[in-house]
Image: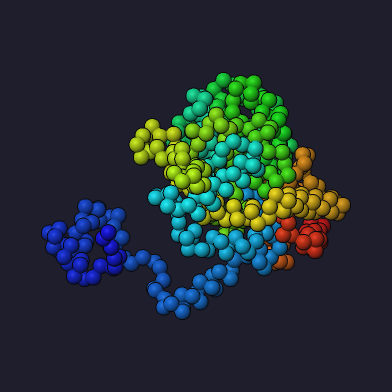
Amino acid sequence: MNEFRYLPDTAQDQKDMLDFLGIESVEELFSDIPAHITLNEGLAIPSALHESGLTKKMRYLAAKNATAHEYSLFLGAGTYDHYIPSVVDHVISRSEFYTAYTPYQAEASQGELQALFEFQSMVCELTGMDAANSSLYDGFTSLGEAATLAIGATKRSKILISKAVHPQGREVLQTVAKGQEYQVEEIDLLNDSTNLSLLAEQLDHETAAVVVQYPNFFGSVEDLTAIKEVAAAKKALLIVMANPLALALLEPPGKLGADIVVGDMQPMGLAMNFGGPHCGYFAVKKKHMRKIPGRIVGQTTDTEGKRGFVLTLQAREQHIRREKATSYMSSNQALNALASSVFMSALGKEGLQKMAQLNIEKAAYMAKQLESKGFSIKNKAAFFNEFILQLNKPVGTINQELLQKGFIGGYDLEPDYGLENEVLIAVTEQRTKEEIDQFIEALEGMTK
């Protein structure tokens, strides 16, 4: 096998290439670009720094970030501050996993394949579904792929999505729908949950699927059984975007009628990392298994009868079907899927249930304490670890004051939902009683 070295071009290298092309300078390569759009001065960027100076500069900039290491964090809205056992980083930092990416000579990577197989198995157990793939980029990517699968499977042209689904997830779906040429209609809310009456009105025989979040963006637990009943009346599929940690206690969507369950594994072993990278999961009933995007790892035996793992139902169709492919998705988040697998294995079933229970109890405690101080909690349905809090001042103003006192406040709901002075508060198992009480005390002083 030939080895290639990657080195910067020398002056002689550049001269040899220009001579081969029969031109005198690099500028001649761009001679077709009109002069009036050509940049004729240097870029307005600082000059290069030496290594130690650059290190100091980057540390100075990093110190400006407000993180959960120095501040008490009550911000969620899709990315959460959860406990991560130290074993997770120890395992995923091993070179054989850290550099594996997606194996192309797959069967030579038995450890990697087994880790992904275990990931799929645990996702199926959490969701109550029959099959799961080995991950996608994030929860919103999974949502877009789920809608596309529903459109293809039903041969219909419309998706109904609840406004209680994450705003960014709805934006991603609109983008995907434009390329795939199907419609997306949003269902208005009744308080903090999907309005079932409006869902029934908007549902028709062109509706491929109904999409809801579980728990939804406001932390409230949707009634999946009732939503499934409405969707089934027009033979539309039910797509559920679910928080995997909440599924440790909530009834699995697969047992409540979901046809496709997707979501983001960030709550399970993935650090917040200022918003990414995440890891999407994608699970289906057996009926749709062959339409699942990405790749599935299967278990088999070799010629000697030994247990082994292989890539199976690998939907890299764009290699051969091009524009007729059912999905553009050919890759996965193998390293982050491994992190989630290690996380779930380390905590075990009882540990996950206890962690989820702590989220419920601490959020409930905070909500009860706030109400005792005269604050209004807007959620009507039961909630997991997030709830809507009504304030008497703009959320942005309150959050700036909270930051000065060592707290990162919640998510302002006005830009996305027009809810004036309403904030989405997240409480995970990481928050102590002292932090919660101090946050409420600080908030009380600001809103008098």
The x and y percentages for residue 183 are 51, 30
322 left or right of 296 in image:
left
Which corner quadrant holds the N terminus? bottom left
The x and y percentages for residue 51 are 43, 77
Q: Residue furthest front?
A: 304
Q: Residue at x 51, y 77 (%)?
A: 56
- Compared with 406, 203 (above or below) is above
Q: Residue at x 39, y 74 (%)?
A: 48
| Display colour scheme | rainbow
- Compared with 215, 277 (above or below) is below
Q: Residue at x 66, y 28 (%)?
A: 228
The x and y percentages for residue 427 are 73, 54
150 left or right of 407 in image:
left
Which corner quadrant holds the C terminus? bottom right
- Compared with 205, 327 (above or below) is below
329 left or right of 33 in image:
right
Task: Give the number of marks.
Answer: 0
Give 80 or 356, whichever is nearer the viewer: 356
Q: Is residue 426 visible?
A: no
Give 376 or 312, whichever is nearer the viewer: 312
Give 63 or 87, whichever is nearer the viewer: 87
296 left or right of 1 in image:
right
Residue 189: name its quadrant. Answer: top right
The x and y percentages for residue 219 are 71, 45
Give 41 or 320, whichever is nearer the viewer: 320
Q: Is residue 233 visible?
A: yes
Residue 440: name its quadrant. Answer: bottom right
Q: Residue at x 67, y 48 (%)?
A: 245
